[in-house]
Amino acid sequence: MPSDPSHEKRPDARRAAAAASPDSRPGEEYGRPVRVLITGLDEDGRSCVVDEVAFEPPPGGGLQQQVFEVAVDPPPSRPSAPGHHLVLDVPLGMLHWLLVQWEPNFEYPRMHYTDTMDFHCVVTGSIALLLDDGPHELRQGDGVVVAGVVHSWQVGPDGCMTSSHVLATPPVAEEAPPV
């Protein structure tokens, strides 16, 4: 099978991992801790970051750490939200895995929400998650759980690639009209 010349231009991750110090810590290759943001709502119903988890090795070594869990089946419905409803066409109970290449300086045109729970990890570049409480910069290695809240995206100057797992959630029950 002929070799793909595009593979020759990519850094060899195995070589980089082998060259790392055996006692190096996660995130050191980025010069900072790797973090995962968890979104939710504040007391006024505005989208915000409700938790930030640093990726640290568990006691006894290793590089695995649970940062979020969906402990109910089906997952909970998203909170009621104003804004644009973006339909992702993920059937209830299904999970889609997406790789998204974002153009430099792209900004999603409006705040939106989805009937999904989204798990994003920045593979390359940077992107800001825009919530009602302001922008939250995510850089290579960072992640975020967007739990159906109103949000938008603004990409950094070098573009960005994200790896995203999109889990469908039940739609919100229709709210009764005001009396």
Image: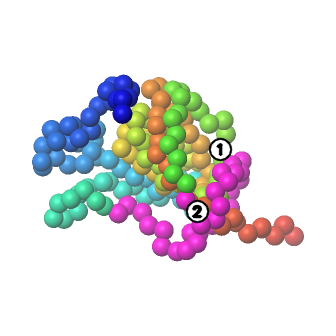
Q: Residue furthest left?
A: 22
* Dot 2 amino acid type: Met
Tell me which secondary structure the magenta stretch mostly adopts.
loop
Quadrant of the rendering where the N terminus is positioned: top left
SS category of the residue bearing label 2:
loop
Q: Which mark is residue 111?
A: 1
Where does the image place residue 38, in percent across and percent down from the top left?
Answer: 46, 56
* Dot 1 amino acid type: Met
Density class for disc 1 (Cα within 10 Å; few <14, some 14-19, many ≥20) is some
**From mark 2 to mark 1, how far is it between C-alphas?**
24 Å
Q: Which residue is mark 2?
A: 94
Q: Residue furthest front?
A: 1
- Write down the region rendered in magenta: 66-95
Quadrant of the rendering where the C terminus is positioned: bottom right
Q: Which comes sooner in the sequence, label 2 or label 1?
A: 2
Where does the image place residue 47, in percent across and percent down from the top left?
Answer: 58, 53
Q: Residue furthest bottom?
A: 72
Name the one closer to the observer, 26 or 93.
93
In the image, is residue 146 above or below residue 105?
Answer: below
